[in-house]
Image (tube, rainbow, N blue to C red):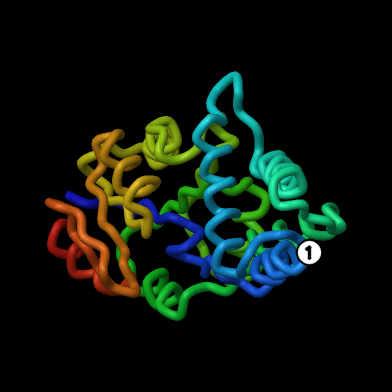
Amino acid sequence: MIKAVFLDYTGTIIEEGGPDGMEMLRRCYKNSDIESMEAMLAYWWKLIKTFEAVSYKENYITEDEIVDKALEECAAKIHLKEDFQDLHRLCQRFWAYAPAFPDTKEFFERCSVPIYVISNNGLSYVEEGMRDKNLHPAGIICGDMVRAYKPHREIFLKALEVSGLCPEEVIHIGDSLTSDVEGASRAGITPVLLDRKGGKTCHGITVIHSLPEALPIIENRK
């Protein structure tokens, strides 16, 4: 029986290509040696995921600290010359003010069970993002609460603790095969893969192409 939905933030609720984030990366591309905007996008997200992967427990650092480290890496490896404080502010604005996907509001309005947002981003940014978009989750669980990022199971276990539910009583919806599908599975939670663009496959995992497609799944298992 499904009693709640755990929902990813970046790439599921908000667009990964928000204007502030894209402006930051355009400036990184224009003021570095990297060969293209596409290469800059790939390089930046690889840096972020690499730092997140090793940021765990006693080695945990915040997303703000990760951005600083990623910018330092860009300076060293692709010779980025920029105002790092200004770039960091753009990244912070992206976390809070990137636009929601068009189907997000409908999902929040029609979902008949509580929604808990799970994010690697800092709590203050996700809270501001929810206020900005007039969305009202039952709770927000972030990496800084457990000193671990997805796909580590700790963040999902914290969500279960906050919700007061068991793994079999929730589903987790997210757009990442690693962070969301693998992470939820590690905690015994049924994952649902969101693939708005099409083309992703994951054996044995339910794939949806918009958030409202999850509503019948929830209703059929209530």
**Element on which disc 1 rests:** loop
Residue at 43% x, 52% y is 116
Residue at 67% x, 50% y is 124
Q: In the rendered view, does 51 fall on the left or right side of 125?
A: left
> Tag 1: residue type?
Asn
Vertical arrangement, residue 96 with respect to residue 105, above or below: above
Vertical arrangement, residue 105 with respect to residue 28, above or below: below
Circle 1 residue: 31
Residue at 70% x, 52% y is 78
Taking the view exactly as shown, the residue that stands out farthest to the bottom is 102
Taking the view exactly as shown, the residue that stands out farthest to the top is 58
Percent across and percent down for residue 108 are: 41, 69
Q: In the rendered view, does 173 fall on the left or right side of 56?
A: left
Percent across and percent down for residue 207 are: 22, 63
User: Closer to the camera, 197 or 110?
Assistant: 197
Q: Residues within 10 Å of mark 1 (few under 14, many from 20)?
A: some
Percent across and percent down for residue 49 are: 52, 44
